[in-house]
Amino acid sequence: MSMTDKISIAIDGPSAAGKSTIARRIAQKYHYIYIDTGAMYRCVAYYMLAHQIDLQDEKAVSAKLDQLDIRLTNDGKVFLNGEEVTSVIREDAISLAASTVSAYPEVRAFLVEMQQSMSQGGGVVLDGRDIGTVVLPKAELKIYQIASPEARAMRRYQENMRRQLPADFQTILKEIEQRDYQDTHRATSPLRKAEDARVLDTSEMSIEEVVDRVSGWVDEILERGKHQ
């Protein structure tokens, strides 16, 4: 690693493991840019649903990609073709649709290229399913963040309640299990741990405890970089 105070951080893991919460907190703490890759896939899904494109029709979905202009702001807002979609893309139906479109090689290639160009120069935190394995294979810190399906369903349930979105624990648990299956069994960039990733099971941890653990790893790498 070169002498730098800006490293790249890749956080992978299953749906609703709290990756984006941790990624945001770490980005704020170190004044890094948070690139919300999940929001980018959700934007694709949202656009296709809004334009009545059949999500099962891979060719039709791929043909529309050049219509998409996705912008992420430093304060966490998401814009699609100039329209703010920050909240609407978080609905559970969009989550499931995002899992469908993210299995398509052309969709992934389109967004991976966008993510890599946003990440040049370091000082970035990305979270998703294939950041450490595909998007940023040379990231200085790779984390594989997991939690039990029940813990993840409870977090999503509580989040939905806070956001006044529809919330039924059993439905959310089923959707999470279905999403896990889709993410780990797809042909293109399935969810898997990078060989050099540090595993972090957050089932029994508070957000503060997770932030502390990750900060310790970041500080250790930055300190090491100073002495090289």
Image: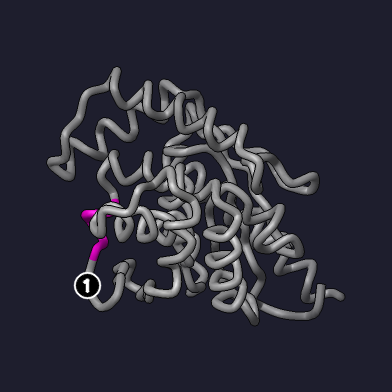
Picture layout, residue 136 above or below residue 70: above
Locate residue 73, reporting x and y percent: 35, 75
Q: Residue at x 68, y 63 (%)?
A: 136
- Magenta region: 85-89
> 221 or 81: which is nearer to us?
81
Magenta residues: mostly which secondary structure?
A: loop
Picture layout, residue 81 above or below residue 96: below
Quadrant occupied by the C terminus: bottom right
Residue 193, image quadrant: top right
Circle 1 crowding by C-alpha within 10 Å: few under 14, some 14–19, many from 20:
few
Q: Residue at x 30, y 55 (%)?
A: 46
Residue annotated with mark 1: 83
**Is disc 1 placed on a helix, strand or loop?**
strand
Picture layout, residue 183 above or below residue 130: above
Locate residue 205, reporting x and y percent: 48, 33
Q: Residue at x 25, y 33 (%)?
A: 158
Q: Is residue 46 magenta?
A: no
> 75 or 89: which is nearer to us?
89
